[in-house]
Image: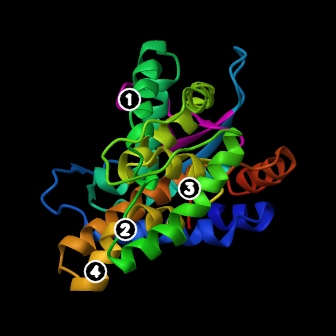
Amino acid sequence: MLLRGLRSVCAVPRQVRAVHACAVRLNAGADRAEQSMQRFWKDVHLAFETPSNGDDEHFVVQLDRRNLRTPGGAKLAIPADRPLLACLIAQEWDEQTQLIKPHSLPLTSLMSRAIDALQDDERGRKEVQDYLMRYLDTDTVCFFDKEPARLVQLQKERWTPLLEWTRRLLDADVHTATGTLVCRQPDATRAKVERLVAGLPPLDLASLERAVMVSKSMIIGLALIHRYIEAEQAALAAEVETASQVAAWGVIDDSHDVDHAELRRQLASVACAQVSTEPELVEKFLQVLKKHDGAFRT
């Protein structure tokens, strides 16, 4: 109910809704042997809080009216400009059945990562920033091949636009290479990327971290969190080599299917977390929230 209300007042992009629906369906391919907890709640609610201590307004997901908390024990406070994210996190918990399966909570884990590791801990942020910068000189998108022809064509189609966009974003050069494992980027480019990453809010940094880790590309991650590309485009850019192999040799049952699904599930969570909403539309959504007393039904 609330998710439909959000769609009606905030004009949520169709591709974002489709991406999340895809992510939910792909959960079936996760490890079935994963240990899970029993569902202990009956109802899921979404609430909006205006703290009296001066903290920022935020959404909270409630299980039987108790605020959802992160693994670190903090309240899972979702930024006020991300009502779609709040709804989708509530949906993740509403869709849990008898057992709680952690792999089916990608948005919850992303928000928790932002709060527990990247919100107040300067050391934690610095470690993440330094780790992500390691990908810049080994970025998948920067390494081109001379053969086979299908791979060369896919790299040109899926990577060249990303490289051009990155150069515009940074107003700096981005080097590419062929036949080597490292492509050292100019110092000026590195400095601009470092400043950009250091200035990201916790949720955006957590999103970038996930996107870079699964795609092995800082460029793909930046393009996704800046909403230059959608999750499917990011996945296609990340799996160029696999697509070339499939074209030549066909699909390997299970292996390719699982990798294909997991990549899209992770990138979909990043894309959904990046959708922000204008204040006036948030106000309209809050009216819907109040009308339905926060009871979450999709």
Is label 4 or label 2 in front?
2
The image's mark for residue 146 is 2
Q: Which residues are magenta?
A: 58-81
Residue 216 vs residue 264, the one in the foreground:
216
Magenta-span inclusion, residue 59 = yes
Residue type at tag 1? Tyr
Tag 1 and tag 3, C-beta contact below 8 Å: no
The residue pinned by badge 3 equals 271
Magenta-span inclusion, residue 165 = no
Relative side of 186 to 53, left or right: left
Compute the Cα span from label 2 to label 3.
32 Å
Q: Earlier in the sequence, mark 4 or mark 2?
A: 2
Tag 4 and tag 1, C-beta contact below 8 Å: no
Tag 4 and tag 2, C-beta contact below 8 Å: no
Compute the Cα span from label 1 to label 3.
21 Å
Residue type at tag 4? Val
The image's colouring method is rainbow
Residue type at tag 3? Ala
Judge the density around disc 2: few (<14), some (14-19), many (≥20) Cα neighbours within 10 Å: few
Q: Earlier in the sequence, mark 2 or mark 1?
A: 1
The residue pinned by badge 1 equals 131
Q: Earlier in the sequence, mark 1 or mark 3?
A: 1
Tag 2 and tag 1, C-beta contact below 8 Å: no
Determine whether 134 is above or below 287 in the image: above
Q: Residue at x 46, y 67 (%)?
A: 155
